[in-house]
Amino acid sequence: RPAPPSPYLEGLNAEQRQAVEALDGAVLVLAGAGTGKTRVLTTRLAHILATGRARPWEILAVTFTNKAAREMKERVGKIIGEAVEGVPWMGTFHSVSAQILRRHAELVGLKSAFTIIDTDDQLRLMKQIIQAEGIDEKRWTPRHLASVIDGWKNRGLMPEQLGEEDKYAFAEGRGKDLYAMYQARLKVLNCCDFGDLLLHTLHILKDNPDVLAEYHRKFRYLLVDEYQDTNVAQYMWLRLLAKGTGNLCCVGDDDQSIYGWRGAEVDNILRFDKDFPGATVVRLERNYRSTEHILGAASGLISANRDRLGKTLWTDEEGGEKVQVRGLWDGEAEARFVAEECENWVSAGRSYADIAILVRASWQMRAFEERFIMLGLPYKVIGGPRFFERAEVRDAHAYLRLVRSPEDDLAFERIVNTPKRGIGETSVQKIAMLAREMGVPMTEATRIMVGTDEIRGKARTSLQVFLRDLARWRDLSETSPLNEMAEIILDESGYTAMWREDKTPQAAGRLENLKELVSSMAEWDTLEAYLEHVALVTDADRAVSEDEVSLMTLHGAKGLEFPHVFLPGWEETVFPSQRSLDEGGTKSLEEERRLAYVGITRARERATITFTANRMIYGRWQSVLPSRFIDELPHDHVEARSETGYYEGGGPGFENVRQTADPMASSYSSPGWKRYQASAQENRRTTPLTIDAKANLIESGPVGGGSGKWKTGDRVFHDKFGYGRIKTADGSKLTVAFDKAGVKKVVESFVRELP
Ligand code: ATP
Ligand code: MG
């Protein structure tokens, strides 16, 4: 029986309609940029709801950013004409996984209130483990370990599943053990990192047939956008879930696979027919986004890649402007040119919001920002230092995290002495050591310690007050709205006062950020929901609502479209990047070329590519060559002009100087990296963990606590108080009569038994 006429289907072409209406079984839409893949997915979702095939909560829809999910919700609402109260299972792989994981956290040894940690915390943990293992952290950096472990997680591998070939990935074969320690430590802290969201969920579904069956019943339809960028773990995750009804629709474009460096496997697309025999494969060839010249330039460029399926693309939008290529003298001239063009665009009656500047690496943004600030042009950096990554915001979050889950040691360490409370590095070290030895959270270790003489004076009083405050705030969190609670905590802890008294120029801005943070929390009902949101927002999620130019990376621009797109820095070693050139071979170069293709195809009306002859890199001027990608653009679709006379016929005096510098190294000057270095320096000053403490990174059960092995009269030695004899033992606390120091209460693990 034919479905009732649906106006939302009418705007679609025949192939799009086929993809929307083929509701049963597996469907793959494999098509080039701007052909309406995302539109098909949205319409399909609307169609499923409109025809009553499923209710909103029976659909799982995976988008690449949370922003895309929001947009999809809106579009679906418009199509079916009523507010879709929510498609609760719509979001990124990470956010959907987080939802699933919260419901079954105990199956992987977590509590459902687990904290999702970010890169900063991840690196701090790695560092602690590397140090505890006595590994040279200069040679084997935490960053390196993090990328090795992320790589394993992207492939869906737990430590025990690592193969022989993975053995030498880090520190001469010790990577696997470090990975196991890291995972164990996360569990003790009731934390997980980004990769874990997927990995844990994957293993829950794999190891618990009843849970899997529950989701098979639940999800009647699965929809996935940007399928070409799924990694192995995501692919396995999807395949497991899709085994239920088999109603899986994926859309993607092999030419836009740009996350290979993060483990994405474009082969997932090529394998689709094999995994889902009888799958309907739909190809879309009509591009609705760009003009003929833009499409022609992009298609010509990507045809230089050998490793591709190849497809035809055409558009009705004849003519339009050719793609502009401009050679400029240096980065400053480039920024001046781009800013001027933006002003011209607006003088012609268009708006700033039409414009995007898409860079290869974030260091390129600075010159544009400076120019825009100078001219007073409105712009927004998408993916700059994110609001949630600022130190004051992270401090505030640490307070909230600790209030919510007392076992969050990372949060504890961050704020126990921020603002300064006279709790020194040694006290914190002692607490950390005790916590590890006993396998308890640092808050618990603190509680034990303050009842003894291990910590005295100011530190002891401060810690007592701190514990009392935490308990009070915890009560508060049950009764007060989130924003009020946050405000009270920041006030009572002295955190706000700390910045008010700070005389540095940044202090005022920090106070503003804290205010903004508090007011934004009013939107959320629970602390869990709020912190989850914070952990999962991505760069591209920042709203672009005002009339501002968007400045972002090419990677961040996937799926988006703008009337006017600037593509600066098309120079050898910038784009393609030095790294891709160093790696040699065609694989990473082809990925760079796909990135260029993504860049050009974001443009609807006008694309402007620029390159310079001179670049200041690491404070040194270097001559640079135009990108090979410029040569690969078909001449019919391009109009090139160069101020330097360099592009046409090669100018005098510029040789191809290959920089030794890594253009990606811009991240080294990011605030996150600087903070990381600062904390690294701080940590270097503190003593590494003892051998015993190390063992407890893996074994988390209490070790020796209240062991009853002590008898009155036992002879003991304590590092600080010297020799003494046990008077009484109470759990892990001992009262000892020291020969010199007198009677003290000490913690059992700091005492050595003497024969
Ligand atoms: P990308 O590969 O860049 O993600 P895409 O294939 O997902 O692109 P969409 O973003 O869905 O493409 O669509 C590109 C543009 O074309 C959008 O502005 C969309 O509204 C428009 N479009 C898609 N299909 C049609 C159609 N049948 N009629 C009119 N406009 C369409
Ligand atoms: Mg899309």
Image (tube, rainbow, N blue to C red):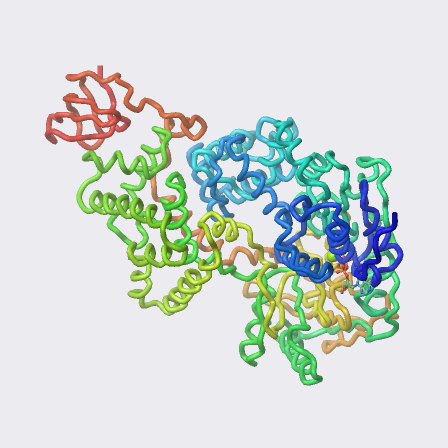
Q: Quadrant of residue 744?
A: top left
Residue 9 horizontal/vertical position (percent) = 82, 59
Q: Quadrant of ligand 2?
A: bottom right
How many callouts does the rendering have?
A: 0
Residue 693 higher or lower than 4, as above or below: above
Which residue is the extreme one toward the top?
755
Residue 573 placement, left or right of 746: right
Q: Residue at x 82, y 53 (%)?
A: 31
In this rendering, position of residue 661 left or right of residue 705: right
Q: Which residue corresponds to the image point at 80% horizontal and 41% vertical from the top-left?
A: 26
In the foreground, 414 or 360? 414
Q: Quadrant of the C terminus?
A: top left
Question: Position of 663 compared to 746: left or right?
Answer: right
Closer to us: 580 or 198: 198
Q: Quadrant of residue 211?
A: top right
Q: Is residue 126 visible?
A: no
